[in-house]
Image (tube, rainbow, N blue to C red):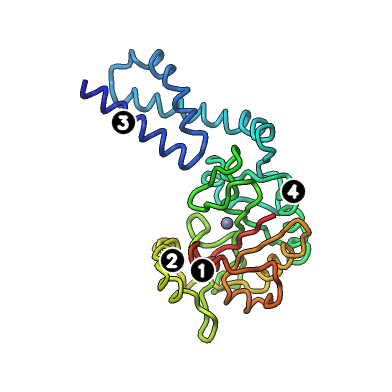
Amino acid sequence: MWNTIKSFFLHLLIVCLLTLFTQVGGIIWLLCLPLFYFFFKGIKSKRKRRLAKLLSFSAIYLLFTIFLIPPLAKWQCGRVPLPIWSNPNLKPHSVFYYCILNHHYVRPEMKTTAENVAKKLFIKNPGTVLCYLDANFPFINGYPLEPHFSHRDGKKLDVALHWQKINNGESIFGTPGFLGYGVCAEPLSGEIDMEPECKGQGNWWRSLEKNTAELFYNKKKYLFDEQTSAEMIRLFANEKNVRKILLEPHLKQRLGFGKNNKIRFQGCRAARHDDHVHVQL
Ligand SMILES: [Zn+2]
């Protein structure tokens, strides 16, 4: 009895975590349960049985992700995956986190916009690759990609700012951070700093990603590439489809977008936007 209850809660936890991170993984896990029961119940060793389940689930999840989810997403809510390797000018910061976990779905107009910007950016700054972060899950309008609660309709996309190595001025792909988020071009002295005001309004999580990311890279080794980042934001702002771009006020000012109404502060309730740019249609 106790084992059945334990097993139920373990499966529930797995389904919740997979749903949180991949949207579809929990359902795929449930679909795999009969298979686990019929094919692996004869395996005596607990460790071997768990390994068999993990491997078979991973294989089935990958098959779904590669072959089944793209056509179903197009049919269900008109979303398409952003390129993974097919466009040399537009790539994910992490193939595993953003693509295998299905965080890279957008409406076709957003895909075209991102590809246009990536192409123009590459022409202006040869060698520059546009790095994307979280977009949207494949299914259901209104279903958010946590922790970005507005990423729920296929019209939102986060892209990384651009960075260089201090020692040789070499541009790097994306940011030096693990998943791309949290590497901040912080306010310089004399610039508008929203941190005290937002903290005063009770936003304790505003710099959570920054503080976490800084544990995993050496801030002193990298320099914010203002010129390439400004060029990328300008190209997005010039796209007709783009209605709003979220950026911290100090970067809006520093990069010369003071009068651009498309580029706005996200407000104190959201995470900071000097580590990435949020683009929406
Ligand atoms: Zn966003």
Secondary structure under tag 4 reads helix
Residue at (53% x, 67% y) in the render: 267
Badge 1 vs badge 3, beta-carbon distance below 8 Å? no
User: Is the residue indicated by label 4 positioned so its CB lies within 8 Å of ligand 1?
Assistant: no
The residue identified by callout 2 is 207
Mark 2 or mark 1: whose residue is earlier in sequence: 1
Residue at (57% x, 51% y) in the render: 134
The residue identified by callout 4 is 109
Can you name the residue that lies furthest to the left here? 2
The percent coordinates of residue 77 (x first, y second) are: 66, 37
Secondary structure under tag 1 reads loop
Which quadrant of the picture is home to ligand 1?
bottom right
The residue identified by callout 3 is 9
Mark 2 or mark 3: whose residue is earlier in sequence: 3
Q: Nearer the viewer, residue 5 or 121?
A: 5
Q: Is residue 110 left or right of residue 136?
A: right
Give the residue type that dot 1 points to.
Cys
